[in-house]
Image: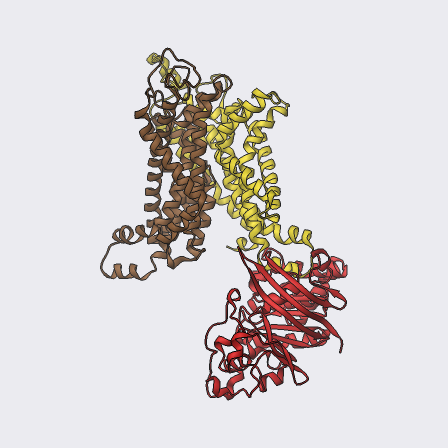
Amino acid sequence: MAGITGKDAALTAYANALAAEAPKGRSLTQDALRRLFNNKAALVSIFVLIAIVLFALIGPYFLPWAYDKIDWAGIRKPPDWAKGHYFGTDQNGRDMLARTLQGTQMSLLVAAVATFVSVAIGILYGAIAGYFGGKVDAIMMRFVDIMYALPYILFVIILVVIFGRSPVLLFVGIGCLEWLTMARIVRGQTLSIKQREFIEAAKAGGAGPFTIIFRHIVPNLTGPVVIYATLTIPEIIITESFLSYLGLGVQEPQTSLGTLISFGAPVAESLPWMLFTPAAILVVTLLCLSYLGDGLRDALDPKDR
Amino acid sequence: MADVLVVDNLDVTFALHQSEVKAVSDLDFTLAEGETLAVVGESGSGKSQAFLSIMGLLARNGKASGRAMLGDVNLIGMSPDRLDRYRGKDIAMIFQDPMTSLNPTLKVKTQLAEVLVRHQGYTAEKANRAVIEMLERVGIPEPVKRANAYPHELSGGMRQRVMIAMALLCKPKVLIADEPTTALDVTVQAQMLDLFKNLTNDFGTALVLITHDLGVVAGVADRMMVMYGGRCIEKGPTDTLFYDPRHPYTLGLLHSTPHVAKRAKRLDPIQGLPPSLEHLPKGCAFHPRCAFRFERCFEERPPLLPVEDVREKACWYQGELKYEAVA
Amino acid sequence: MFGYALRRVLTAIPIVLITITVCFFILRLAPGGPFDGERALPPDQLKNLRAYYHLDEPLIMQFFGYIGGVLRGDFGPSMVMKDFNVSRLIGIGLPFTLTLGFSAFIVGTIGGMIAGAVAAVNQNKWPDYLLVAIVLVGIIIPNFLMANLVQLFFGVYLKWLPVGGYQPGSLIHLVLPVFILALPHGGRVARLVRGSMIEVLGTNYVRTARSKGLGTRLILARHALKPALLPVVSYLGPGLSYLLTGSLVVEQVFSLPGIGKYFITAALNRDYGLVLGTTILYVFIILALNLLVDILYAWLDPKVRYR
């Protein structure tokens, strides 16, 4: 099933363009990088994203309060610079900035792992289907078509409910259901790559199918993978936030952006900082990833040459 | 015979990011009733843009100025709404690529009948009958079946016949055909040209045949206009231009066309590439590729001037054009 | 056309069956269950409960029993809400979710198409820029966050609209939920229509139509709209699934009594009977709607029918 951010439409268009221009193949060349850096929105997004990631990773070491430490003197307090609660505290007296940074870390981690899982499954599945072709391909892609039609968020929820609410499971569970589009793209690419001369040469040299897939086909997929990843990360961040919002995601005292928002929302009238700090980080991150994804797609667009 | 289309001082410019490109400069010509005019040039010579501007079909960044009098109305600068009273009725156009020029989501019948409904006020039923008749006329077998087909169910030649039928439904005074045979098989090309000739004769329609292929021009066109770098560089009756070209570019074109140059010993392409309209050379646009150039050609652009009664050329060289000099 | 539709219906049936089967076995084999509460139940009571819900029968018997029930419209008992069976709960929630979903679908699709077409015709002028900005906001901000923000703004600060809840027949309670659900859907539709409309307006066949002097309105309505809608129609399938996800959120945030709310409550309580019932229902609805979309697509694009 298509996901939450409409990335599949964008990716499918990109994959079609790739297929149409097939034998050329595209990778992250210097040329593409130069075009990416000429795109101001994408460039700014890269810097903002780097800043957010660094801040989320390093920031906690410089804060006076840890994310799970309770300040009994400062419960439900607005931002207070003197005490070191720069973004205020929650109902339990925990520092909101520290919690937001921990939540950002968690959201990014979930997104990174889940994206990795989905890319890995997608490449393997798509490359096998494309490389072997024929009946194998037909059956494997029919399965993907069927999966596409199903409401995957329900299955994520069911998985989480059945197997407990551990973050690791969340990573893998989301990743396991997100690979469909990747598989389609990789299959299309594999179909066109496998007709090229160097594959013939490798076959003539006695290389087995999996050697060919991993040595020759996978390295040619950099472009699609990079775009796929930038578009998938926000989708997973949203999914994770949504699950956490429903109370199915990351559990206390650990937190994620979605968890923070779900705790902040009911009290937003009296304690607005509890909602707006995590919400702002979430929106800025998503916005930047969206711009970056668009920029990458334009930079790697095979039509544009 | 009376002139049906008089074009005067036509300029077409395109706005680019920071600059402007002039695709057509100072074009003048007339088209008499029932006449066939061939407009010849390499791609980028401005031949298509000139006629798209007359039809009001320039791209969004394009602008035309000058006059194109269809009878007593000037088509240039006319609002699209007013233009729609003439387009498709008195002046029609056929495009190069019949594969993409028909709407893939509409039946052939629909795309043809709408012209008659719009311009002649026919009822749908009457229009449909006229459509079948016209399809038969352009040589489509089983016209009733084809009329109910979608474009992708027809062959390329068949689609171009549909385009011709569409353009001729209202028996226009002027028909502009932009490379009508380029996308077709060679075997179909000749049939298509015959069809053009017969139909325009029958309807008294004046035909403008835009092409880069002189082989297409021979035997079809009464007069011919050669364009280079956005300007007309030679025009006159087809026969005289074929047997006695006066512009070195026309001469070069003739010798690079297999069908026409069969008496020559060998086929010679014109040296060099056509100029980009953004960077036209100073002086005569053709001078970098010209074998007859001299100092003046580098500095001054030659105007289009009459040579003898019926023809004009834009070239400083007044001597005899010897083909050996080119080779 | 009819043959095509029939073939599509026939291929959808096994998908429904497979989904039911997979979900059934996953849920039955899952560790933990609705009776693993805080306090362990006495063994004889547990035994009675299991017998009541047929959990002591062989799995395969349970499965066929369940399928038989589903075919008769009986989705079995809810294991947590003791006084209701699943069919009854679905009967309460489904009309509401469908009302919400279809309202949002219609508002979003039509609004998006109009906005996209307006933007395309005014390419690179202010209506276009305005639309692109709105669409970006609508798509980027996750809808549970957006729902909270509009709830806060219109419900709490301005007090124009109710914060949540639902009274039968009260349209005003539906305004915010439908808006939240329709916004990203409409945004995506608008973006698609804008893109494809710009592309279609630049095609050769639209140029042909202009050369025929048909007039802008006729060209847009007859020549440009149908092909420009193709990508939109192919998006509607995924878009419907998206609306489903959205309705889970919206029903939760605005406390609305739809099946999304039941599904989540059931999931949190491990009420497997209700989870299974709502999941099957969702899958069925989505497949049915996708089927409709496919048929609509075939009608719009004659080439598809012959594949």
Rendered view: B200 above or below B49: below
Which colour represents chain A?
A: brown
For the question of whether residue C65 can be seen, the reply is no
Q: Which sits in the foreground, A143 or B199? A: B199
Q: Quadrant of residue A122?
A: top left
Which colour represents chain B?
A: red
Specify whether C82 is left or right of C203: left
Rendered view: A78 above or below C143: above
Give me the residue at 45% from left, 23% from top.
Answer: A262
- The percent coordinates of residue C22 (x first, y second) are 39, 34
Which colour represents chain C?
A: yellow
Rendered view: B291 above or below B157: below
Q: Which sits in the foreground, B40 or A54? A: A54
Specify whether B317 is left or right of C211: left
- The percent coordinates of residue B140 (x first, y second) are 63, 69
Specify whether C168 is left or right of A291: right
For the question of whether residue B237 can be seen, the reply is yes
Quarter of the image that includes the N terminus of chain B: bottom right
